Image (spheres, helix red, strand yellow):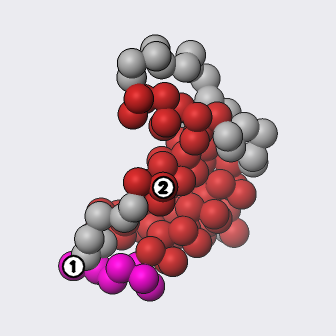
Amino acid sequence: MLRDTASSRFNNAAIAVKELAAQPEDEDLLELYALYKQSTVGDCNTERPGMLDFKGKAKWDAWNGKKSMEQETAKEEYIAKVEALIASIGKK
C-alpha cells in the first residue's frame, strides 16, 4: 500500500513538473532528469555519449551520479525536488 502511494505521488509529480510557470534552471532540469531515470530505470545502463554531445554527456553524468541510489529513494527525492520547484516557480 505504501509503495502504491509513493508511485502515485511520483506519477503526480511527473505530471506537475510539466505545469511549472517557467522553465527551471539547467542544473534543476539535470537533477530532475537524473532522479526520474534512476526512479524508472535504475542505474545508468548506457555508454557515455561522445565528446561533442554536450547535452547528452551532461544528462548521462547526472544520471550516472545517482548510481546505487535505491529507486524508491530516487522517487522520494524527485517528488521533493518538484515540490520545491513548485514552491519557488509556481504552476501555470
Residue lying at the far left in this picture: please name it.
Answer: 92
The quadrant of the picture occupied by the N terminus is: bottom right
x, y percent for residue 4: 60, 63
Mark 2 or mark 1: which comes first in sequence? Answer: 2
Q: Residue at x 49, y 28 (%)?
A: 57
x, y percent for residue 48: 55, 20
Query: In the image, what residue type sits under mark 2?
Result: Glu
Q: Is residue 13 magenta?
A: no
Q: Does 44 sit left or right of 33 as displayed?
A: right
Q: Secondary structure at mark 2?
A: helix
- As rendered, which of 44 and 52 lies closer to the eye? 52
Separation of disc 2 and disc 1 at Cα?
21 Å
Query: In the image, what residue type sits under mark 1?
Result: Lys
Disc 1: which residue = 92
Q: Does 64 sit left or right of 23 as displayed?
A: right
As drawn, 74 above or below 20: above
Q: Secondary structure at mark 1?
A: loop
First to last magenta residue range:
86-92
Q: Residue at x 58, y 34 (%)?
A: 61
Disc 2: which residue = 27
Using the rendered image of the protein, determine whether residue 4 is visible from the camera's viewpoint: no
Q: Is residue 88 magenta?
A: yes
- As rendered, which of 88 and 77 lies closer to the eye? 88
Q: Neighbour class for label 1 at 10 Å: few (<14), some, many (≥20)?
A: few
x, y percent for residue 74: 65, 54
Residue 63's disc is none
Q: Residue at x 37, y 64 (%)?
A: 24
- As rendered, which of 49 and 78 lies closer to the eye? 49
x, y percent for residue 78: 56, 61
As drawn, 91 above or below 59: below
